[in-house]
Amino acid sequence: MSIRVAIIDDTTMFREALRRLLELEPDLTVAGTAGDGRAGLDLVRRERPDVVLMDIRMPGTDGVAATRQIKAELPGTHIIMLTTFSDDASIFDAIAAGAAGYLLKDMPTDELIRAIRVVTEGGALIPPAIAARLVADYSRLARQQPAQPAPPAPPAPPAPKSEVDLTPRELEILAALADGLSNKEIGARLFLSEGTVKNYVSLLCLKLGARDRAQAVAVALRQSILR
């Protein structure tokens, strides 16, 4: 089965080089390319690719806005954000918009091709180096928040527990998602069936209030569930 890929990037040379590289893979087909977010939206609506490689910084409609629109219209489309730098704010914007992953443009070609296959199987992609930066930034922001004195209040019943309560197995699944593993790969790691892993992922998304596995990882990082 061929995976159809669309490339949206405002650098012509990069688009064409990427097209040539992908066309060397027997299971990948380039459905088309576009040079900006608006043209990319038209391309995706017309060609319905399985995966979109999306530049995050483009004139006019940028990658985040285009991703948000694509996911609203075609939620089954997998989008990988590409950039030349690791901008933490953009990472969260992209994941919140529905992107399945975020990769740097200078990554090795074989890793990019693997990433395309991973997201097609339902996996998510947050490179460990970027995940570590996100955790560090959230820890720094937490330390910078001034302590707010609690106002006096009459005794009240204990408030319901607000933090997410995950089992050890769910934490294992979550860590595997952060590693970018597909359901099949998680099953092989944890000796579970692919269907069981899928059920765990759905439950994690429900508990974390996330729309998909990529956002579940982002929420877990933000709440320091993953360290």
Image (cartoon, rainbow, N blue to C red):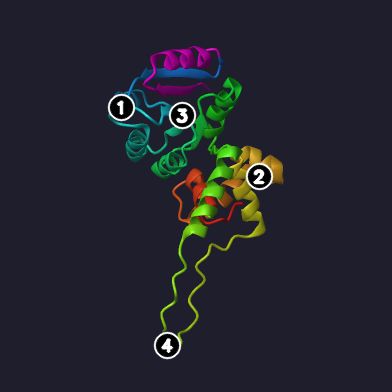
N-term mark: 2 or 3: 3
Extreme residue toward the bottom, this view: 154
How far apart are the two marked residues, 4 and 1, measured between alpha carbons? 55 Å
Which disc is residue 83 wearing?
3
Q: Amino acid at mark 1?
A: Pro
Closer mark to the observer between disc 2 and disc 3: 3
How far apart are the two marked residues, 1 and 2, measured between alpha carbons? 45 Å
Closer mark to the observer between disc 4 and disc 2: 4
Label 3 SS: strand
Q: Amino acid at mark 2?
A: Ser
Label 4 SS: loop
* Residue 13 inside the magenta-drawn segment: yes
Which disc is residue 154 wearing?
4
Residue under circle 2? 193
Q: Is residue 154 above or below residue 202?
A: below
N-term mark: 4 or 2: 4
Q: Are marks 4 and 1 in contact (CB under 8 Å)?
A: no
Closer mark to the observer between disc 1 and disc 2: 1
